[in-house]
Amino acid sequence: MDSKNTICPFQEGFYECDRSSELVGPRKGIKDDDEKEDHTYNHVFEPGSILVEYARTEACRSAAHCLHRRFFDGRMVTVQYIPLSLYRA
């Protein structure tokens, strides 16, 4: 199976994602108004870690499936699930 052209299977109400779409660049569409960052939690996660919370498990799984192994800023995105207790730390 060719992962570059895989269409993600979705539950009803979700759109299909296409892994062959364009790559995105760093901070694309983000304004530089927020120059000051909160470094309080830098000791918990690696630099470059992004946490996303979903209300529905199905949406979480679909997003993880579509994002895993895509490229952003020349680096491969990897998706991992973390315990809720660590997320809320």
Image (cartoon, rainbow, N blue to C red):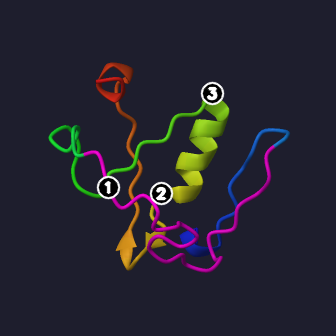
Q: Which residue is at a point 40% across and 36% down the rendered structure image?
A: 81
Mark 1 near mark 2, Cβ–Cβ under 8 Å? no
Say whether marks 3 and 2 touch (CB < 8 Å).
no
The image quarter in which residue 59 lies = top right
Amino acid of disc 1? Lys
Q: Nearer the viewer, residue 42 or 35?
A: 35
Image quadrant where residue 85 sits: top left
N-term-proximal mark, 1 vs 2: 1
Badge 2 marks a residue whose secondary structure is loop
Tell which circle, 3 or 2, labels the residue nearer the N-terminal end: 3
Mark 1 neighbour class, 10 Å CA radius: few under 14, some 14 to 19, many 20 or more: few
Q: Position of residue 54 (x, y in %)?
A: 58, 33
Looking at the picture, does residue 27 appear above or below residue 46? below
Amino acid type at image mark 3: Ala
> Which range of residues does the magenta coloring cover?
14-38
The mark lying in front, picked from 1 and 2, is 1
Tell me the residue at 78%/39% (across/down).
11
- Amino acid, disc 2: His
- Give above or below for 50 relative to 59: below
- Tell me the residue that label 1 is attached to: 36
Q: Main secondary structure of the magenta part?
A: loop
Please name the residue that numbered disc 3 is placed on.
55
Describe residue 43's horizontal placement relative to residue 10 as left or right: left
Tell me which label, 1 or 3, sits earlier in the chain. 1
Q: Which residue has dot 2 on it?
A: 68
